Every structure is written in structure tokens, then in C-alpha cells.
Image (tube, rainbow, N blue to C red):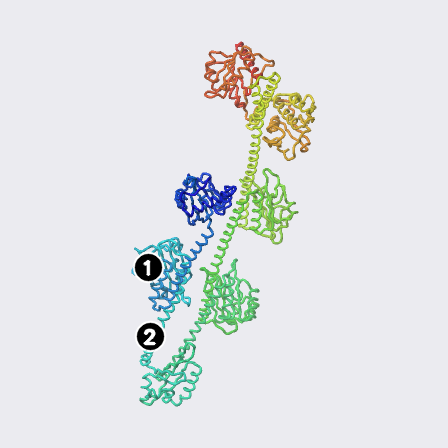
Amino acid sequence: MTVIPPPDPGVEQSLELERIRQRLSDLPDPVAMLEGIVAFSPLGLQIFKASGECLLVNRAFVSIFGSEPPPDYNVLRDEIAKERGVLSIIHRAFRGETVHLPPIWYDARDLTQVDVKEGRRVAVEAIFFPLFDKDGAVVFVGVVFKEVTAEQTCQEQANREQELLREENTLIDRLRRIGSTLTAELDLNKLVQRIIDEATALVRAAFGAFFYNVTEEGRETYMLFALSGASPEAFSNLPLPRKTPLFAMTFNGERVVRLDDVAESPNFGKEPPFFGMPPGHLPVKSYLAAPVISRSGSVLGGLFFGHPDRAVFTERDERLIAGVAAQAAVALDNARLYNETRVAEKKLRDSEQHYRLLAEAIPPIVWTADTDGGIDFCNQRWFDYSGLTLEQTKGWGWMSALHPDDVPRAVALWEASLKSGNIYQIEYRFKRISDGSYRWFLARALPLRDESGRIVKWFGTCTDIHDHKRIQEEHEELLQRERAARAEAERAEQRFKFLSEASTALSSSLEPEKTLSALVKLAVPALADCGVVTVRTADGGFKNMASACAKPAQLEILREIDRRFPGDGGAAHRAPRVLTSGEPDFVGEIDEATLASLSKNEEHLRLLKALDLQALFCVPIHAQGRVVAALTLMATGSGRRFDPADRATTEDLARRAGLALENATLHKAEQTARWEAERAASRVFRLQAVTSALAEALTRSQVADVAVEQGVAALGGRQGVLYVLPNNGDRLVMLEQMGLSREEAERLMELPLDARVPPCIAARTSEPVWVELDEAGGAPQAGDAGIPSLLGAKATACVPLLLEGRTAGVMVLCFDEPRRFTEDDRFLLLTLARQCAQALDRARLYEAERKARREAQAANRAKDEFLSVVSHEIRTPLNAMLGWAQILAGRPAEPEALQKGLNVIVRNAKAQARIIEDILDVSRIITGKLRLELRPLEVVQVVRAAVEVVRPAAEARHIDVELSVGDGLVVSGDPDRLQQVVWNLLSNAIKFTPREGRVRVLVRPVGSSVEIAVIDSGKGISREFLPYVFDRFRQADSSMSRGHGGLGLGLAIVRYIVEMHGGTVEAESAGEGQGATFRVMLPVRETWERVSDPGGKRAPEEPEAPTSLASIAGLRVLVVDDEPDAREILTAILESKGAITKAAASASEAMAAVDQFEPDVVLSDIGMPGEDGLSFIRRLRALGAAMPAIAISAYASADDSERAHLAGFQAHLAKPVDAGALTTAIAGLAQSNAQSISSE
């Protein structure tokens, strides 16, 4: 390409270009230099044709953008280039302009149209310049790219940082302005309005509100104090906000709340006004709120902001509003303090005025004194009473009006109060000026202290009590009465306190026994010297449940009476009567006669006297509507008597004890119910855990492990064993165990099913066996040599695993301690056993499915390998046949070559037919349609015939075939199939025996059977493959490089045929290179019968061929086949044997030819288009035609032969047809037909 500058580029540019051109001309190879510059330039270069196609790019371009443009890239069709304005620059460059493209961001994938560097974005600066031809026309446009990604990134980052800095400075200025405003403003109303206005603008809210926290009538209320962005009138009719979940966190002072959409918050309230703004105003989506908390920690109120758009407020706004709230709290505290100070000053002035008015208005004399005790103020009442002036009263002058006898005492006490700061209070007498009499006054003064606690003033009063002193004596009597009433009230209070404490003590325990014991301890010694609680026993008797005495000796006497005279209440001899009647019994005085009447004998009387019983009170204790106990209180030698108050207290105590017993009974019932519920819940939880664990277990081992582990854990067992019972098994087999030693596990690995041990008993009876031992270690309840004795367990549970009524196994759990299996234990184990049985069945199905899948996968692999081998085995003879056919068709051949070619074609055709026959045999085996024609035969004849068949092949490889047979060995069998067995075994032996090898065939009687052994010295069979040697589609070497051909079907056919004869076949080999032995065992039968396939189907018998070659010369044969080649070969074969033929290409042609040609035999294909051979023969027979017919078809199964015979054919021959077999079949049918006609 010649690059020349544009016409008239300007003087300076022309000179520069001329200078460069001159220097380039001086170089030996300027083009190479330019290529180097382009290739190694650090700047990206791209050249475009006028059509928009990219001519070239250099390495720097690829480095910048990651790849070259695709081959079909055209910049004129690039929409992205058009959007970026690059296309217009290209056009300008093609018009001769040089254009500079400022730095832009470009995605490498947009420019190269390929996915490179994961879509790396680059910043590039470019120059678009035209390239001219020698005529000055623009022929190309060049683009020089310089990557400026780092520079652009830094510049953009700097721009962003500057923008952020400007925003931060603006924000700081606004916050400083807000802080200054809040600090300077002390008017609360103005302050709050400024706060909400500034904060609303700061966070870009549509509206803002400040709610003030006020307390009215003991509850918190939130008053709307200020609004921004909305008028207060709009909110006048709306209810004030409550502590709904949406507002609670703010009003409680918890934290700042920010919501992107109020409606999506779970704390959102549906009712107005929380749904949004008042009617006519914007709805609220974005929500921001912050509590305003004072220095003391109290919540002053809350700042609330809203916006109609979603997610307006950011985390930054959240932090800003928290700072504003903190500043607002300080400003509000300052404003409140300022207002409170102003109010306090006003209150102080008002208070002083009020004080002076109050001092003048109240009856007592009011005075104040300084810290030294000098009086500095008195109200007018003092001046009127004493006649002294303020000047005469100031200081200590007031003492001139004091009674002389009271001065020392008054001065001493005043000085003491001044010193200690204690309240000054004294009664003394002042002289009244009006009549000169002295009257009693009560003087009282209190100190006023400043914030530091220092006394700054004394305030005092003097109240005239003279009249009060006069009536004091009258009050004395009233005081005495009051003391008596107070004493009674104190006793009542003590009784109440006692009963309250008793209620607490009685209710502290929820066990009836402890409640009754606490009852008697409460009564003694508070109410009596001794106490007894008696209850009725289950047999109708009586029993003292608890007793107490103030003296230990008396308690021992009580216990002795209970031991010596049980059943009648003992010392509490009135308790049985009270328990029966339900009424209290009181004996206020017990003398000698009464005591004697209460005793049962002299000993009883002696003990009662020792107790010194003097009084007795017995009360019933009622609970739940019946008498449950009796409390007997006794006075013993203390002189105590039970007055009405004591008896009332005792009855109240008994009533409270009854309530406590009711509560205890209810609690016990509730505890029992709760325990039952918890036990049921625990059982359900454990069963759920068991179910979940068993559901996850896939194999029988996993199921057994889960069952044993869960069973042991559920009941706290020491050992666990899970046995399975195989189908029709005679013993239990251990599947899993836990806690057994190795010796124990080996000893118990299998248990005979008829053994008299608990697991076997459970398995035989399908019932659980619970072996429970008592504490003394008694004999087990089931079995005489059971698991407990074997494992040293104290208790054993044996639960059968039942599946559809059948015992699948037994789960055994053993325990260290004697135990009784509760209903819950049994339910849990039975449920666990049922779920375990089901899980074992699922695991069995799972394992069977996995095994079946593995077998199916193996079968599929074998089938694929077999199909590959089939393809190879069929194509190999076909290759030879096709090759020789092409050779013979291409040129005249010498007779010897012609005969060799024909022999190869025939041999390979027969080999191919043999392969197809093997495949068909396998198909018959799989479908159960392989038939045997059984008759008595000598095995030796079959073996000899097979040996003769394979002998040429053996001799060709110099393999010695040795036959060792015995005569007279007769079996019932199909000679063709048995010969096929021996032939297959011999063919395999010869195939796998090396040259100069040896094959031996032995036929000998073995018991009631005949043994046919084929022994070779060949390749042998590996130990790994030996179990699969008779499987279908299996070969020891199925690779493409295998050394021997074959489909791997022969031995499978051998096994099936032998087994159909009632025999067996087995293979032996010491390993590869050691040869192999195949043994066939056939039963010797005295009688025989023809047997058919297992399905009972049997094809009609084929006509027996004549023993001598029959001639078909002169026979008229109609050949029907839609394939021209098939018609020609059949016609040629028949005509070569002297037959007269007529060919038809379809069933319709054949029907026409029957009348004209009058054939002796019809030879027809079955599979023909339009009307097939079966339909043709049916139509022919329907017209009464009786000539014999032979079906020829590639459908070669037994079913195909049967269908042909049923349709009307007398014989069925499978393709490819052997000429001899065809001639024999035609001759036989013609002869049979002729004999039939002659006999008629």
C-alpha cells in the first residue's frame, strides 16, 4: 500500500511528510521498517477499508482490547459505534479529516464483538486519520488508540472525591448553622420549629414533625409540637400517635428507625393516621424517626420524617438525624432550664408575697431568725400579743416577754438546736400585754438549708396551747380507753399476722404430708402446748400424721402413746369423732375423772397423766367438700386455756390448711397431667426422631444401626441386638449390635429358631417377650437359657419385627438394672419395631433396585459391546463377499480364480448365515420359543458328527483332535441341537487353541448321566471372567483389538440347550494360558417323549425330505418376489435343475399367472409391499387352488414359520436359501401332492 498525504495538506504538513518520505527512501527496506513500527508500537492501530471492514490491527490493539475483531466485523454496521459517535468520525476521516477522539470508556466486547477479559472496560483516546492513494483519494482510515484507563480512573475518582468533599462541607456548614441556631435560641416554640425545619431540609424529607412527650393523669401522651412541610390544621382532627409498634421504638428512646417502605414493615399499623398523611396530602412510604433524649435519659419526644417515594433516606441520613436529635436534646434542655429558671424566679417572688400574706393570715405567731439565733422577723400577731415593737423583739429581745422560769430551758434548747441543726420544739409561757397573764405556747422552728446543706435561715411558729393544756386531763381518760382498744387491736393484728404467716407457710409446700406437718408446727407453741394432725387410713382406721410439742419430753410421750395405742388417735382421742362428724370438739377442763374416762387401761392412763393433759380442742380440716384430717390442740401443764379467740383462730387456721391441701391436691393433679403430657410429647418427639432417622437410612445395615441406637437410648439400655429372619429361614441372624463384646457377638451371631430363648420365642410366636427380673434377681419370665443369663442382664425386651403378618426379625434390648416395662416402654418399643420392619423392607427394596440397576447397566454395556461385535462379525464376511463379487464382475477370471472367488463367497455367506442363526437362537431362548425334537439317540453319533464337521478347521491349524468315546450311551434329545452344542464347544476349543495344539473329546457314563468333556490346551479363562463365561453378550475380550472373532453367544446357547435337555454344563480353567475344560452332563433316560417349547407352541412339521436326491425337472414353479435379484437367483437355481419357471413381482401378478401358468408348486416371498405373501396365499386358497406352496422369507423365527403354515403354505424356508434344500423341498411337496391326487 502506498501512503501519500492528502492534496494541499498545508505547507508545514507537506514539508514534514516530504522529509519523512525522503528519509524512508534512504532506507534499504522502508516497508519492513514500517511493519516493525506498526507491530511493536505501544499505541494500538486499526485500519478500516472504505467498506467498513477491518483491514488489520497490531499487537498493542489486541493488548488494549483483549482480542482482534471477528473476521466479519464491519464498523459501518456497528450500532454501538454509531451510538458512541465513532461512526460519524469514521465518515469524517473518509472525507479527508484527521479527528481527535477525547478519552471515552469502552467495553472491549463492544469493540471486538467477542467475549474477552470478562468484559473489561477500558478508557481510550484515539486519532482517526485518512490514508490516501497516489491520486489523493482516501482509500483507508487509520485509528491510533492510546489506553488511558488508569488516568481516567484517577480523574473520575478525584472528581468523585471532590464532589463528596463539597457535599461534606455543605453538610458541615448546615450542621454548624443548626448547632448555632439551637444554641442561641431559648424560646422553646421557636426552637422546636427551627429544629424540625432544619432537619427536614437536611434529610430531604417531604415533611417533618416533632411530637413532645407530656404526662397527663399518670399516662404518657405525645403532643404534636411542630410541623414542617404540612400545616398544623391538617392534623387538627387526627388522633395523637400511640405507642403502636411503629412508633414505640422512638417514644421508648430505643433507636433511630429507618424504613424504605412503611407498608412493608411488620410494625406497620393499618388504621389512620399511621397509614399516611391526612387526606389531600402526600402518602408516606419512606420513614425516618429518631428519639430526642435529654441528659437525664428521659425521652423528650421524637423527630419524624416522611417522603412519598420509596427508599429516600440513607444510612447517612440516619446518622445525621441521630446527631441532630442529640443537639436538639441539649437545646431543649437549655430552653427548658431557661424557662424553668424564669418561672422559678417568678414563683420565688410570688412565694415571698404569699408567705407574708400567709404569715399575717394564720393564727400562730410566725417568726424567722438568722443563723446566730437572733430574731429578724415577726408577724403582726406577735406585736399585738406582746406589746413589743420589731426593734424590741430583734435579736434576743423577745425573751423579755418569756416567763422567767422558762428562760433557762428555752435558751439551752435553742442554743442546742442552733448548734446541731435539729428541729427546735418547746413549750413555754409568754406574757400577754392586754391582761398581764402568761399563756402556754408551743414553739417550733425548722432550719432552711442551701444546696450545700448549710443552714441559711430558721422559720418558726408559736401556737397558743393554753386552752389545750387545760383540757389535757380530760383527754387522759380517753387515752386510757384508746390504749385498751389498741391492745385489743394489736392482739387482733397478731392473730391476723399469725394467720397470714400460717397461710404463707402452708402454701409454701404443695405436698399434703409437708402441709400437715407445717400446720402442727405453726399451732405449737403459738396456740397450744402440743398438737397432733390425724387422718383416716385406706382401711378405715386412723393415723397420726404429724405431731409437735413445746417440750421435747412431751413429744416423746406423744410418740410412745402412738406406738402403744395405734389406730384410735392416741393422745388425740377426740380426732376419730371429729373426722366422722365433721364438727369441732372442745374440752375446756380435764380433771382426774375425765382423764380416767378417756384412758383405755392403766398404762394408757399413766401416759396421759405424764402428759399432764389439761384442756383439748379438736377441729376438722375440710378439703374438696370432705373431712380429710383433724387438728387436735392440747394444753399440758402450762395453765393455758382455749378462749373463744383461740378457738376462732384455730378454726381459721384449719380452714386455711384445708385450702392449702386443696391447692396441693390440684397441684399434684396438674403435675401428674403435665408429666403425662411431657411424657407423651417426649414419646412423640423420640418417635419423630426415629422416623426421621429411619427415613434417611437406605441400607439394611443403616436401618439396623438406627433402630438399635434409638432403642438403647430411648430406654437407657446397656446392650441392643437386631436379628433378621431370612425367608423360610431356620435361624435368627445378627444384623447389628451395640454394647456387646467381640466374644458375646460371635456367640450370639446366629440363634436356631427352635431354641427356647426369648428372641427365638418372640420370632416363633410373633409376640413380644418381656423378661423382667425382681430386685432379688429372680428367674426370668420367659425362656430357660435366655439372653439375660447369656449377657448378665437384669431385664430384657424382645420385640418381633412384623411385616405383613410375617416375622422379619427380632429387636433385643438388655438392661443392667431390674425393671418393669411400663405401657409407655412397650408402646415405644412396639412402634420402633414396626417402623424398623418397614424400614428394613424399604432398604431391601432399595438394595434390590440398586442391584437391578447395576445388572441392567451391565446388561446394557454387554448389549452395546455385543452390537459392536455383531457389526464387526457381519461386515467381515460381507467385505469378502463384496470384494470377490466386484473382482469377478470386473474382468473375466481364470477358472481357478473363479472357483476360489465363488468358494470365498459361499463360505462367507454361510458364516454370515451362521451368525444370523446364532442371533435367532438367542432370540428364541430369550422369548422361550426354542423347540426341541426329542428322540432316543446315541451320544457317540452326535459327537462324531460334530467332530467331523470341525476336523478340517483343526487340521488347517495343525491341531490334534482326539476322540475318546464309549458305545451304547443313549439319551433322549434333539440330535441337531446336541450336535450344535458339541460343535460350539469344539469350535471354541479350536479357535482358542494355538497351532500345534491339542483338543480332547471324552464321552463316558457318570452315574445316571452321560458326560461329554471338551478339553483344550489353549488360551484358558481368567478367574475373574470364569463365572460369566455362559452369559449372553459376554466375552473375555470384547475390545476392537481382540485376537478372536465371534459374538459371545455360542456358550450361552450351549447352556440353554443343555438345560432344556435336563442336563448341566460347567467350565473349568486354571487361568489364562492353562487351557480350559467344558463338561456337559446329560441324563440317561429309559423312555422319552417329544417336548415342545415352554409356552406350549409348536410349529407344524416340515415335510420330510426324501432320502435320495429328487429331481424337479419338468415341474412348473411360480416364483413370487418383489425383489428383482431374488426372483432372478431363484429362477436361475430352479431352471438349472430342469424346472419350468414363471416369475411374478407382486401378489396381483401372481394371481394372474396362476390361471395362465398352472404351476405345480408356488414359491412366494412373505414380506412384499402392498399385499404380502400371507395375504396372497390366503386369497389363493380361498379360490380353491390346492397346489403346494413354499414360503421364503428373511423372517426366520418359529412364530414366522407357524404363521406361514396357518396362512396356507406347506413349507417355510429362511433366507438365504440353500439350493439343495430348496430343490429337496420342491421335489418333496410335488411328490406328496402327486401321491395325494393318485390316491383320490
| Place of residue 440 in the rendered image (x, y in percent of width and height, measured from the top left) | 36, 85
Whether residue 775 sits left or right of residue 670 in the image: it is right
> Judging from the image, what secondary structure is the residue with disc 1 in?
loop
Whether residue 930 sits left or right of residue 630 in the image: it is right
Q: Which residue is mark 1?
A: 229
Do we see residue 476 in this rendering? no
Do we see residue 40 in this rendering? yes
> Judging from the image, what secondary structure is the residue with disc 2 in?
helix
Mark 2 touches mark 1? (CB < 8 Å): no
Q: Nearer the viewer, mark 2 or mark 1?
A: 1
| Place of residue 609 in the rendered image (x, y in percent of width and height, measured from the top left) | 55, 71
321 or 452: nearer the viewer: 321
> How far is disc 2 from disc 1 in space, using C-alphas?
37 Å
Please, what is the three-letter code of the amino acid marked with disc 1? Gly
Work out whether 342 lies above or below 88.
below
Q: Which residue is mark 2?
A: 346
Please, what is the three-letter code of the amino acid marked with disc 2? Lys
665 or 166: nearer the viewer: 166
